Image (spheres, rainbow, N blue to C red):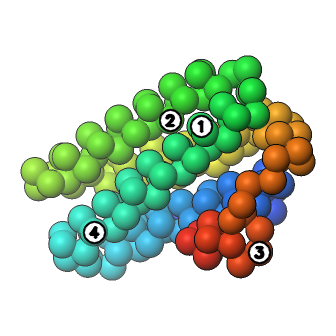
Amino acid sequence: MSKLVWNESFNLGIEVIDQQHRQLADSINRLFDAYASGQSRKTLGKLINELVDLATYHFGYEENLQEKAGYSFAEAHKKTHVRLAGHMADYQARFEKGEDIFKDADSLLGNWLFDHLKHDDADYVASAKEYLRHNPVPGTGKGGLMARLFR
């Protein structure tokens, strides 16, 4: 897998969401670097679990923000998250059964993240920013809990 290289064009302008997206890209890179360097299945399993945990948390956070912001396509957006979470759970289960899932997961994870950012996520930004302008979320500023979790 080629390394996922973050650039400023992927930022949505919502710092806590941008931090979470960068963390997801970093987690995907760590996983595939570990695979490419021949790390143990135990290490790979731990990295897969961390990626799934990050993605699950991020999806919930993003969906909650969309709901609060009154984003009209929140339900459709959630369906894209459910679909990817299903793929990730399938890869996780297959890995635990001893399969080599990395060739399949490579194309899904790398392509999905950046495609999702540029298309699906970009669509809710205006609604979310408007909501956040009137309803600042505690812990999302510099040094807040969310900022510390997603560095």
35 vs 64, left or right, is: left
Query: Badge 3 is on which residue?
Result: 142
Q: CA distance from mark 2 to mark 3?
A: 27 Å
Query: Badge 2 is on which residue?
Result: 81
Q: Residues within 10 Å of mark 4 (few under 14, many from 20)?
A: few
Q: Residues within 10 Å of mark 3 (few under 14, many from 20)?
A: few
Q: Is there CB contact under 8 Å for labels 1 and 2?
A: yes
Q: Residues within 10 Å of mark 2 (few under 14, many from 20)?
A: many
What's under tag 2, amino acid-wise? His
Q: Along the polypeptide, which appears first: circle 1 or circle 4?
A: 4
Query: Badge 1 is on which residue?
Result: 63
The quarter of the displayed image where residue 141 is located: bottom right
Residue in view at x 18 percent, y 70 percent: 41
39 vs 130, left or right, is: left
The quarter of the displayed image where residue 139 is located: bottom right
How far across and how far down the image is residue 66, in percent? 68, 35
Q: CA distance from mark 2 to mark 4?
A: 22 Å
Which mark's residue is nearer the viewer, 4 or 3? 3
**Which disc is residue 14 wearing?**
none
How far across and how far down the image is residue 138, in percent? 72, 60
Residue in view at x 82 percent, y 34 percent: 127
Q: Along the polypeptide, which appears first: circle 2 or circle 3?
A: 2
Q: Viewer-proximal residue, 124 or 118? A: 124
How far across and how far down the image is residue 16, in percent? 70, 60
Query: Badge 4 is on which residue?
Result: 46
How far across and how far down the image is residue 58, in percent? 54, 51
Q: CA distance from mark 3 to mark 1?
A: 22 Å
